[in-house]
Image (tube, coloured by chain):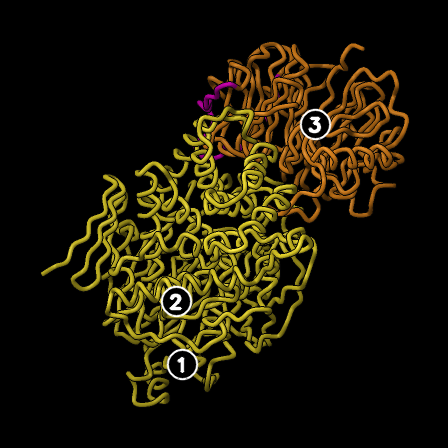
Amino acid sequence: MKKLVFLLLAASLLPIAAHAQPAFSGPPPSRAVVQDADRRREEYFSRIDEALAWKAASVKLDTPEAIMKMKDMSAIAAKLVRREDVAGCSAAVIEIMKTPSTGPFWMFPVACVAYTGRDLLSPEAKAAIRQAWRSTMQLRGDTENHWAMYYASLYLMSELYPNEPGDTWYTGKSSEENLAESRDYLIHWMDLMTTVGQGEFNPTGYLTEYAIPMGLMATWAKDPAMRLRARMTLDWLFADLAANSLNGVLRGPHARTTEDPVMQRWNDHASFYNWLLFGNTPPPAGYGGFGIYFATVARNYAVPEVIYRIAVDRDRDYVQRDLKRSRRRWRYSDVEMAPIYKTSYLRRDYAVGSYQGGRADPIQTHVWDVTWAVPDPRGAHNTMFSNHPHSSPVDMQMSFTAYPEAMIPNLAREGKPSYDEPDKILGASPYEQVFQDLDTVVALYDIPAGARHPQVNGFLSKDLVDREEDKSGWIFARGGNAFLAYRPLADYTLTPFRGYHQLPSPVGYKWERVVTGDTLLQSFHRKNGTIVQAASASEFASFDAFKRAIRALPLEFKLEPTPTVRMKTLRGKQIEVTYGKAPVIDGRPLDYAKWKLFEGPYLNAEKGSRRLTITHGRLKRVLDFATLAVTDSVSP
Amino acid sequence: MRKLSFVFLALMSAAAVRGASPAARHDLYLCAAVNKGYVIGSAIVTMNGLFLRDEAGGFRHIGNNDTSVRGAAFDPRDRRVIYLGANNGCWRSLDGGESWRITTSWDMTEPPDVEVDPNAPDHVYLALPDGVAVSSDRAQTWQRRETGLPARGKYTQVISVDRTRAGRVLAGCESGIYLTNDGGERWRRVLPTETTVNDLQQSPHDPRLWLAATQSNGAWFSRNGGKAWEKIAAFQGGETLYNAAFDPTNPKRLAIGSWALGVVTSEDAGQTWVARNAGLPESHHVWRIAVDPDSGRLYASVLEEALYCSDDFGRTWKSGGMEGSVVSRFVFRPAAAK
């Protein structure tokens, strides 16, 4: 397995402390809807400029020593966009190209600089870039985001240097062959996304690894069809981001996330895009690192108003159901890609999101949570959920071609420290089944004997207020303006949760465990379950009234032989959930086969359609990948 | 890159065991990575990919610096034609490693193994995570040939061509061993397994004798050319077996490499087996083993430790250089005429 590790990101974050990042360190932005289109545009450009100015100023290229030490391609890209230190940029590019790195994380920054600098860099610098694409083999990687970056970069570079023979490219293929292969893959990937759903769906971090290559393609691809495809893909990704974010914080399930953003929900690249496009949340430190590359082309992309309004202008609670897909499974699975049935319920004060459980990605999936709104998301652990800390060599082999025995011990140094830890709060399990109806979640666990970590973990945030273990078995707490009730179905213990703090390391990653102030609920029973109920504080006269309402809910459950919950929800639905069976709501079994690609007030698409309808109020945009058409309309 | 290659060569040569047989009749190629700590996106500061043992016993790097090379094959008619299985697909060189081309497209990725049919050398077989591909024009073009392989269960770790007959090939898949007699046009399962078949080896002494190693279903012999298989009692399953080797100099000597078991050998044609890990690093996570066809020297690649070698079939070991390496494949091929 070749892991994605963000060394380039790490390098780009090094100078963070030295320069002010107004949006990151200042007060949280206003969430008021900007009605005026010109002002929205001005503010968008202002945010782009803020990120680029910060990055450009983070590096000086005024001495030979500075140029020799320079490794940050995003700073070069930012300087080139701003027409600063052009001679220094050329000199630095020549130095950097002497030791090219490998793989998609090297390719897209270089493609970005090659294009931003094509009229600015010296002939020698451009020749150095061109030579690196001949001499240094680039790994394609093994994940969907790797391939998006790899092929978008190869596509653009092949267009930049057309009609060149195979011996001038590391692939051994001519410019035209590289271009054709890249185009074929990118269209194949778009077809998958627009028919059976995105693979690495709603990722907190990897969003940037799709947004950047599509941003570069949307700006620079010569073929108008590919340029349009990329722009439509950006709309698709950002509409999905808008509909799944709560005040600029991407929440709910993710195919992939990491140890910190699964609890500090704001702290990842997705918040850079919410900040940049919608202006309703602070950006993460360093503007997301890689986000700078998107910023270099962001002026060429304008988020459609209909998507902007989905993000910032909501006048109702809503349920959004989406169809996604799991990572490709090479082996030990009856299906190549499993369907992921996602449910989200978003309200002003909180949001609840989930998918049906099971494997989506082998390592970094987050299955469900309740996340509450906070005035300022920075540092807030505004979420609640449970999981089974699944760890399995067989799961590794499903997704990777390498032998698993060495893979698991190496994950920590490759940026995934918690995978094999019993107290982890990240990751999906084949032994978890989740049902959600509005703001009720039932997660059931049937963990077989012999499983590596036969326990269920629950995350109880440091930011919960008035947390109370009630005699009824419920744990009550307040999170922001949300009232929360968490019901473990088996005995448990509460211990301080320990997160992961990254240490400086010249090679790979190193970590130390740190107490975060949160609480880990651990229940050491293989047959197990969690019920969560949420409500707005405004719906009850008092917190005690909420507690009384929860205690009064008819609830029956049993764990043997199979975990089963039968209850009436706070919203009056009669539900019956049995592990391994379809959930039953008000007497009707839930039929996942009817799930659409998108279904909700804002996003709608039929499975297999290649056509997404984005709606807000009178505004409508239709992205039709079947006909390569974008249609905007305004209802009277 | 040339400078780095030179430094690496010097280091490898200095560290290597001296005294490789001056009369060696085979060249030894390694598919190896020396990349502890490497992650995608970082600069590669070591040399990885294909290596050739030199006369001093060191290893000379050939071709791309690729951390992902896991299989290598050669055209028996033309020493300059090399095929590699790697992350990007199947690389081919027609000029002895000076230049390379990825012969596959995006729809064939990460082949764990590549083999040339010695009796039909234009035919190249590629083990793929989602099946098998065959080329009949020296990897210029590829076709999927999977009839008889299951729709699910065709992850292929190893592909091995029977040297006695053109087009007779065994594939080690996640669901068992599959056999074709017609160059992949039709496959049939000859051994069902619950987990992946990691290696298939044909005896250099008796072409009817095959040895298979599996992820968790033990080790198996076939004595009729792969048509029927019998489980080796010493390996009842549970332990991951990575690969197997016959000693071309002694028909009674066999070896198996394993993550947990290390090196296990037999000197009575597989009747009894003994762990031979004394002298290896304590972890003895053995990634790959091989036996030198000229000297009977037993090689063991211990994960990210070094290449170890034994001249008494595992009773004692000494470092053979390649510190920090993982060897995915040993390939012996007849040496070029001087």
- According to the picture, the residue beneath numbered tag 2 turns out to be A442
Real-space Cα separation, disc 1 to disc 2, in angstroms = 22 Å
x%, y% of residue A336? Answer: 43, 40
**C-alpha gap between disc 1 and disc 3:** 61 Å
Q: Chain of mark 2?
A: A
Task: Specify the segment rendered in magenta.
Answer: B140-161
Q: Earlier in the sequence, mark 1 or mark 2?
A: 2
- Residue B62 numbered tag: 3
Secondary element under disc 3, as helix, strand or loop, is strand
Question: How far apart are labels 2 and 3 at the CA level?
Answer: 57 Å
Q: Residues within 10 Å of mark 2 (few under 14, many from 20)?
A: many
Residue type (three-letter) at the residue carrying disc 2: Val
Chain A palette colour? yellow
Q: Residue at x 80, y 29 (%)?
A: B266
Give the residue type at disc 3.
Ile
Pointer 1 local density, CA inside 10 Å: few below 14, some 14–19, many at least 20: many
Callout 2: SS: strand
